[in-house]
Image (cartoon, rainbow, N blue to C red):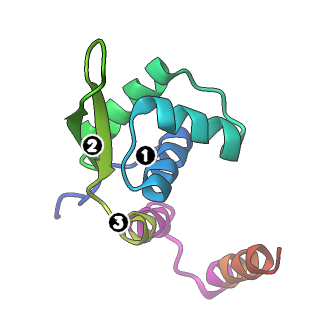
């Protein structure tokens, strides 16, 4: 059995990654603001920084120091994993974990995707 290329991430981590993918690279303050504006999720920059650090540990992000005029430098986070690769991996993991291979199950998933596409 081969190791998983990426550890599983939860819904809040996924939204945090969506912010990074959209911004290209960002610090915790910028990600926190986008979480609030786009996804209506309140997350302080400190809490967001913790989430970003976890995503670094899981291999989804990397960081470098961002120089600021005063105080400690902020970490600037950027993606290591492309959105399409992460989506493909997490969807495949769902299919494998729940043993979804029966034609009826696949038809249900196709129906759900079609409904989402038409929204």
Alpha carbons under labels 3 and 1: distance apart: 14 Å
* CB-based contact (under 8 Å), mark 1 and mark 2: yes
Residue at image coords 72%, 38% = 40
Q: x%, y% of residue 77? A: 31, 42
Residue at image coords 30%, 25% = 68
Instruction: Say which of marks 3 and 1 sits in front.
Output: 3
Q: Quadrant of the C terminus?
A: bottom right
Q: In this rendering, is residue 102 above or below 59?
A: below
Other-residue count near label 1 (Cα within 10 Å), few / some / many at <14 / 14–19 / ≥20: some
Residue at which label 1 appears:
9
Sooner in the amino-acid sequence: mark 1 or mark 2: 1
Q: Please state which of residues 99 and 45 is positioned toward the viewer in this rendering.
A: 45
In the rendered image, residue 94 lying in the magenta stretch gets the answer yes
Residue at image coords 51%, 62% = 98
Q: x%, y% of residue 21? A: 44, 57
Q: Please state which of residues 44 and 88 is positioned toward the viewer in this rendering.
A: 44
Residue at which label 3 appears:
82
* CB-based contact (under 8 Å), mark 3 and mark 1: no
Other-residue count near label 3 (Cα within 10 Å), few / some / many at <14 / 14–19 / ≥20: few
Other-residue count near label 2 (Cα within 10 Å), few / some / many at <14 / 14–19 / ≥20: some
Q: x%, y% of residue 64? A: 20, 38
Q: Secondary structure at mark 1?
A: loop
Q: In this rendering, is residue 27 above or below 74?
A: below
Residue at image coords 43%, 46% = 9
Q: x%, y% of residue 89? A: 38, 66
Q: Secondary structure at mark 2?
A: loop
Residue at which label 2 appears:
58
Alpha carbons under labels 3 and 2: distance apart: 14 Å
Identify the magenta region: 89-106
| Residue at the front extreme of this rendering | 69
Sooner in the amino-acid sequence: mark 3 or mark 2: 2
Left or right: residue 9 versus residue 36 is left
């Amino acid at each position: 059995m081969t190791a998983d290329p990426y550890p599983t991430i939860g819904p809040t981590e996924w939204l945090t990654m969506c912010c990074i993918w959209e911004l290209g690279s960002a610090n915790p303050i910028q990600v926190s603001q986008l979480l609030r504006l786009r996804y209506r999720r309140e997350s302080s920059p400190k809490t967001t920084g913790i989430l970003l650090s976890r995503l670094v540990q899981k291999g989804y992000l990397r960081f470098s120091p961002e120089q600021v005029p005063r105080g400690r430098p902020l970490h600037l986070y950027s993606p290591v994993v492309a959105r399409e690769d992460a989506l493909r991996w997490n969807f495949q993991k769902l299919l494998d974990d729940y043993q979804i291979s029966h034609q009826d199950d696949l038809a249900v998933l196709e129906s759900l995707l079609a409904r989402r596409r038409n929204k």
